[in-house]
Image (cartoon, rainbow, N blue to C red):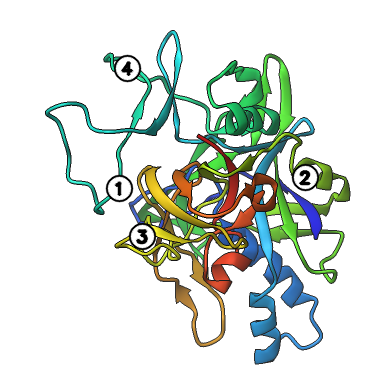
Amino acid sequence: MLKYRIKPLDPLISRDARQFGAGSPMHSLDWMTNTAIAGAVRTALWKDSDNPASRETLEALKKVPVKGNFPILDGKIYFPRPFDIIKSANDIYQITPGEFPHDSGANMPLDGLMPSFPDNEEDFKPEKLNAFWEKDLLTHWLIHGKKDFTLDNSLTLSAPSHDVRVHASIDTSAGTSRDGMLFSTTGLDFIHMNGDKFSQEEISIDADDSNLPARFIAPLGGERRLAEFSRHDEDSSLWECPEGLPEIDGNLRLVLATPAMFAKGWLPDWLDESTLTGTIPNTNITAKLISAVTERWQPVSGWSYERGMTGPKPMRRSVPAGSVYFFRIMNGTLDAKSLWLKSICTGEKDINDGFGLVLAGKW
């Protein structure tokens, strides 16, 4: 597998699937989508292919695995913050499955599913947490939870800041702007400022195709803004599974490192809805879903340039990265290392696009 870094040359736009036209703003998600990055890589391969017009070439390119989409800053790799942590002004709390308190309840989406609660019953106002955690910080959380855990902000990373620009539609025949045809775009600025020091944030991906050039510049995301793709084989060490991940024979926690696509919405396809059990992909382990902590679904769409299919792609709903699924293993023992950055999606296209990569730990 080949490691590449993406260096944005402009603030990038990751469209959120809302309609856009004259007089309306173009919104952006807080991070680039897997499909936008996979499309940029495959388009670069298509341009260098021997027979770009053939159907066989197009179908082969769709199967090229492109995975990852993780921030890299100052030589460190970051992963999405897990949703099973919550912070007050003075302390942090871990969210785990539990029974409803006395004389309380709720309509759960499936029978047998338990709610999850923070380990604190007092009222408090949660503080906002940065979107990404450095690898070692996240590894400690996966192994030990909140035990001896310190949320060091120097090991966290905020989402890229928003860059808002106002544009005018140009009348090409007159070379002037069209009256009343103003619109705005919101892009993601990957320049970080720490004191008086500016740092360029990059995106780390894994592209499994030896025909990909070692360096190339390609449009990425909305408005076809440019980014530089360069090969960095030394980043393989950043992707490696850390030491200390346990073997688990009881309570298993899976954290989504990338958004996931499931045919059943938030529920993984491989789970039976009546029993909440199923075999975890890439393993022979049967597990039962106990609870889940997710946030609002994330839209995934895009624009197709494929001949005969040019136009907007259908909008799909993904489970956001950082979502946490709590399982109880029903048979055998799972080595958490075996699931490190493996996909738990079942669709071949979704797997090749890098959806559903997970990190495993205990709870």
Q: Mark 2 against mark 4, which lies toward the viewer?
A: 2
Q: What residue is disc 2 on?
A: 240
* Mark before the other along the chain sequence, 4 or 1: 1
The label on residue 265 is: 3
Measuring from the top left, give residue 121's x and y in whole percent. Answer: 29, 17
Q: Residue at x 57, y 73 (%)?
A: 348
Q: Are marks 2 and 4 in contact (CB under 8 Å)?
A: no
Q: What residue is disc 1 on?
A: 113
- The amino acid marked with disc number 1 is Leu
Q: Mark 4 against mark 1, which lies toward the viewer?
A: 1
Direction left: furthest residue: 103
* Mark before the other along the chain sequence, 2 or 4: 4
* Mark before the other along the chain sequence, 4 or 3: 4
Q: Mark 4 against mark 3, which lies toward the viewer?
A: 3
Q: Mark 1 against mark 2, which lies toward the viewer?
A: 1
- Number of other residues with Cα within 10 Å of mark 2, as a class: few under 14, some 14 to 19, many 20 or more: few
- Give the spatial CA distance, label 4 vs label 3: 29 Å
- Number of other residues with Cα within 10 Å of mark 3, as a class: few under 14, some 14 to 19, many 20 or more: some
Q: Are marks 4 and 3 in contact (CB under 8 Å)?
A: no
Q: Is residue 228 visible?
A: yes
Q: What residue is disc 4 on?
A: 125
- The amino acid marked with disc number 2 is Glu
Q: Residue at x 48, y 53 (%)?
A: 330
User: Secondary structure under badge 2?
Assistant: loop
User: Secondary structure under badge 4?
Assistant: loop
* Mark before the other along the chain sequence, 2 or 3: 2
Q: Mark 3 against mark 1, which lies toward the viewer?
A: 1
